[in-house]
Image (cartoon, rainbow, N blue to C red):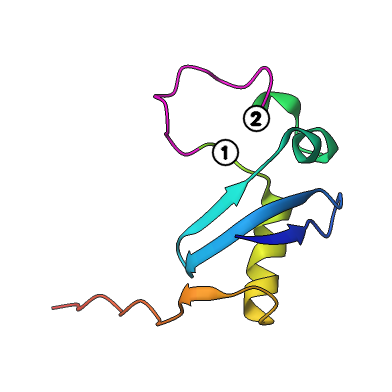
């Protein structure tokens, strides 16, 4: 996992970019509080009706920051092979 700061709110998270389609993000309490995303989206007061371990919504600004950092080579992409286009018959 690599540290990365959001270009919008400067919250720092830990990121692992497994592929262009799969990203792991670890938020800590400070980064959740610093994020501009409404509090109900994650952390205290978040929707608890999801099953444990289910993906949670995340911040669009953070996603854009991660995508940009990966494209610029600032964070590693473990499997950077492009996803093959579907075969259309």
The x, y position of residue 50, in whole percent, is: 44, 23
Q: Secondary structure at mark 1?
A: loop
Identify residue for label 1: 57
Residue 82 horizontal/vertical position (percent):
40, 81
**In the figure, is residue 35 to the left or right of 85?**
right
Q: Nearer the viewer, residue 33 or 62?
A: 33
Which dot marks residue 37? none
Inspect the magenta stretch and tell me whether residue 78 lies in it: no
The mark nearer the N terminus, 1 or 2, is 2
**Seen from this angle, which residue lies furthest front?**
1
Q: Secondary structure at mark 2?
A: helix
Report the predominant secondary structure element of the magenta stretch. loop
User: Magenta segment: does it hold 49?
Assistant: yes
Callouts 1 and 2 close, C-beta under 8 Å: yes
Q: Residues within 10 Å of mark 1 (few under 14, many from 20)?
A: few
Q: Which residues are magenta?
A: 43-55
51 in relation to 87, above or below: above
Label 1 – label 2 distance at C-alpha? 6 Å
| Residue 41, label in figure | 2
Residue placed furthest toward the left: 89
Residue drawn at point x = 57 percent, y = 38 percent: 57
**Residue 37 placement (x, y as % from top left):** 76, 37
């Amino acid at each position: 996992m690599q540290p990365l700061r959001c270009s919008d709110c400067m919250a720092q998270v830990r990121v692992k970019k497994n592929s262009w389609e799969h990203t792991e993000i670890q938020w800590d309490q400070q980064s959740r509080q610093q994020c501009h995303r409404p509090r109900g989206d994650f952390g205290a007061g978040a929707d608890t009706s999801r099953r444990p371990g289910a993906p949670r919504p995340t911040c669009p600004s953070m996603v854009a920051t991660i995508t940009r950092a990966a494209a610029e080579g600032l964070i590693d992409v473990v499997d950077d092979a492009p996803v093959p286009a579907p075969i259309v018959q």
